[in-house]
Image (cartoon, rainbow, N blue to C red):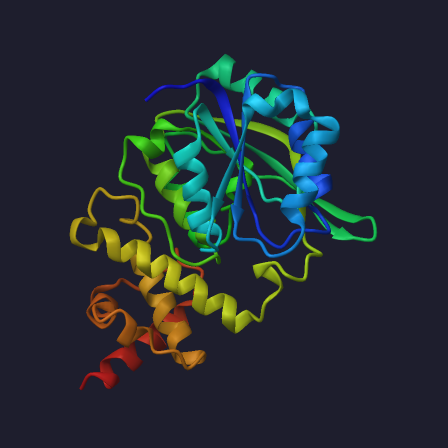
């Protein structure tokens, strides 16, 4: 694996016409120089790419040698990120969403810590932007390579950030390990980053808010109905657990699989979506799953799922 650059910044683009200029200015205007920019056109139908192209011609023509444009049919955020990874040539990877923006020295500060610590993963804080000047800084807990399994558990239970955009990681964690990409765009970042974190040998924290995460985009997945988000989330997590279920012990999903299947059972019950039919092994997995306080799904709900599963297959 050749590293032509120290870091690759990967940004999928789809339906972000109102936001792409602000994002691109923050990305292409980074103070760090040894950086490759990978923009993935995920079959967007608006003027996002035209705005990006015009901005490059207008202000960033000197960066053209370091800019890669990947054009693909629309396949959703996970497939766009995967396409970006395939085109990346940096030692480190940093994802960004093209409706957000970064501090102009974000990459410089991240790479300064990477060079000091030689860490496989560097993670940092973010600012949630609600529109109208309202914002809040979100600080992540402290994690190391030694307690990274707790980090993975906390991400699946929504007690820690699952965002890909706050984690810079060595590309070899992706290229040299088995990484399963989820299919849908809800909590796909948790599913991906749990695997990346699992294989990391060293982790460094940069407790500074370097990324601005837009919460006022009505097209974002987080703006959809709760039932839609729950079902998509369970499908994604179940898909990744399914990929590892025959070799679960010692895998990235070992300590979260029980919580995932119990939550999938609960979501199937309350949202009238038969995940049991979609994942035929779910019923058996629920029978074997241990009810516990480690999971975000309340104990009472977990017990209901176990009873429902038993009655359903009498």
Task: Give whichever of 53, 304 is nearer the camera.
Answer: 53
Based on the displayed image, in which of its 4 quarters is residue 88 positioned? top left
Q: Quadrant of the N terminus?
A: top left
Asked whether 307 or 204 is in front, the reply is 204
The answer to whether 160 appears left or right of 279 in the picture is right
Q: Residue 222 is drawn in which quadrant?
A: bottom right
Write down the quadrant of residue 170 in the picture: top left
Q: Residue at 25% x, 84% y: name it.
A: 312
Count of picture labels: 0
Tell me where residue 59 appears, x and y as whole percent. 74, 27
**In front of the other: 123 or 279:** 279
Left or right of residue 123, residue 270 in this image: left
51 shown above or below 156: above
Q: Quadrant of the C terminus?
A: bottom left
Q: Is residue 310 left or right of residue 110?
A: left
x, y percentage for residue 77?
49, 51
95 lies above or below 19: above
Direction right: furthest residue: 132
x, y percentage for residue 188? 44, 52
Residue at screen point 50% across, 14% down: 115
Q: Is residue 155 visible?
A: no
For the point 41% across and 25% down, which residue is it? 120
User: x, y (%) of residue 265?
Assistant: 34, 72
In this view of the protein, can residue 281 be seen by the observer?
yes
């Amino acid at each position: 694996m050749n590293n032509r650059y120290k870091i690759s910044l990967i940004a999928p683009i789809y339906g972000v016409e109102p936001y792409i200029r602000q994002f691109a200015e923050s990305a292409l205007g980074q103070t760090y120089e040894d950086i490759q920019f990978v923009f993935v056109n995920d079959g967007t139908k608006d003027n996002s790419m035209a705005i990006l192209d015009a901005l490059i011609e207008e202000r960033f023509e000197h960066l053209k040698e370091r800019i890669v444009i990947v054009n693909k049919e629309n396949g959703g955020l996970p497939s766009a990120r995967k396409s970006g990874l395939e085109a990346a040539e940096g030692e480190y990877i940093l994802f960004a969403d093209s409706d957000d923006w970064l501090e102009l020295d974000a990459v410089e500060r991240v790479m300064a810590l990477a060079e000091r610590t030689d860490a496989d993963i560097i993670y940092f804080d973010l600012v949630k932007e609600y529109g109208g000047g309202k914002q809040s800084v979100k600080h992540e807990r402290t994690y190391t390579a030694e307690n990274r399994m707790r980090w993975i558990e906390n991400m699946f239970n929504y007690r820690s950030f699952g965002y890909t955009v706050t984690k810079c990681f060595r590309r070899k964690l992706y290229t040299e390990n088995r990484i399963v990409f989820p299919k849908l765009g809800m909590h796909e970042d948790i599913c991906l980053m749990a695997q990346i974190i699992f294989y990391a040998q060293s982790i460094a924290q940069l407790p500074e808010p370097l990324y601005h995460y837009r919460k006022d985009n009505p097209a974002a997945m987080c703006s959809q109905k709760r039932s839609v988000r729950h079902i998509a989330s369970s499908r994604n997590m179940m898909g990744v657990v399914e990929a590892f279920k025959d070799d679960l012990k010692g895998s990235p999903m070992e300590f979260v699989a029980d919580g995932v299947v119990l939550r999938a059972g609960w979501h199937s019950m309350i949202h009238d979506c038969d995940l049991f039919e979609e994942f035929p092994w779910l019923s058996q997995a629920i029978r074997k799953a241990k009810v516990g306080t480690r999971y975000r799904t309340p104990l009472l709900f977990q017990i209901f799922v176990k009873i429902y599963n038993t009655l359903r297959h009498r």
